[in-house]
Image (cartoon, rainbow, N blue to C red):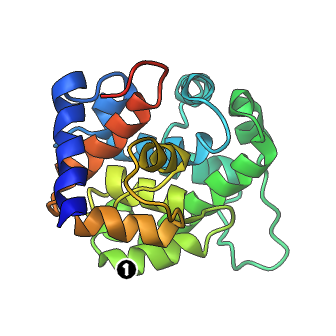
Amino acid sequence: MRKIRSIYKLYLRLLKRYGRPEGFWEKWCKRKKTKKDKEEIVLGAILTQRTNWKNVELALRNLRKAGILSIEKIYQAGNPEGMSSTSYGVKKNLKLIESLIRPSGFYKQKAKRLFQLCEFIIEDCGTLENFFSKDLRSCRKQLLKIYGIGPETADSILLYAGDLPIFVIDEYTRRFVKKYHIENKFSYDYLQQLFQQNLPKEIKIYQDFHALIVLDSKPHHPI
C-alpha cells in the first residue's frame, strides 16, 4: 500500500510542479490525436532510439520537406516498385530514407526499422487505425517481432500513438525509481507491472507521468 500511495503521490507532485507536458510532449500527450499526429509519433519512436529529440526533429523536418512523413509514404519510398515483401527477389531501396533521417544517427539501421514497420502496417493491417483496433497484447506481440523494435519502443508506440494503457519503462524511469527510492529492482517487466499496479489505469496519467519523469531527469533539485 505504501508504494501505491508513494508512486501516485509522486505523479501528483510532478504534475503540480511542471504542469501538463509541453514542447514535443504536448503532441504526444494530446487527448485527441489526428491520423497525422499518430503516424508522426510512430516514426518518432523509431528515430529517437539512441539519440536526443533535437536530432529527431531534424530528421522529421527532412521527411516532412520531402513529403514522406507518413507510414504510406515511407513504405512507398522504400518499395518504389509497389511489390509485396513476399515477392521473390525484391530488394528494397532505402537510400532516400537513409539520407533524410541521417541527423538522427544510426540512419541505416533506423531506415530499415522504419520501412519494416511501415511495411507491416500497410501489408498486414492496411492502416494504423486497423492495427490499433486489435487487443493490446496482440499489438505488442506483433511489434516486438519487427526488426529493431524492443519493449521500450513498442510500448511508446502503443501508449502515445495508440492511446493504449501500457506504461513505458526507459532509462529515465529507472533513474526516477532510484532517485526517489521507490524500488531496488530495475528489470523492464518488473517496473512496468509496479507502475501499472500502483496507478489508476488511465491513459492520460500513463502518458503525462512518463513525460514528466523525463522532464524531471533534467538537472535541478528533486521535488
Please name the residue shown 71% across and 26% down the image: 103
Q: Helix, strand, or loop for circle 1?
A: helix
Residue 14: x and y in percent read 24, 33
Local crowd size for mark 1, using a 10 Å CA cut-off: few (<14), some (14–19), many (≥20): few
Inspect this view and state whether residue 37 appears: yes
Nearest the eye: 71 or 6: 6
- Horizontal side of 42 relative to 193 (left or right) equals right
Quadrant of the image for the N terminus?
bottom left
Please name the residue shown 47% across and 72% down the image: 189
Residue type at mark 1?
Arg
- Horizontal side of 144 relative to 13 (left or right) equals right
Inspect this view and state whether residue 80 appears: no
Nearest the eye: 149 or 216: 216
Nearest the eye: 44 or 5: 5
Quarter residue 26 falls in: top left
Residue 95: x and y in percent read 80, 42
Residue 94: x and y in percent read 76, 48
Using the image, determine if residue 214 lies above or below residue 178.
above
Return the residue at label 1: 137
Nearest the eye: 125 or 192: 192
Using the image, determine if residue 34 lies above or below residue 141.
above
- Horizontal side of 57 relative to 18 (left or right) equals right
Please name the residue shown 60% across and 76% down the image: 145
Please name the residue shown 52% across and 58% down the image: 152
Quadrant of the image for the C terminus?
top left
Residue 102: x and y in percent read 75, 31
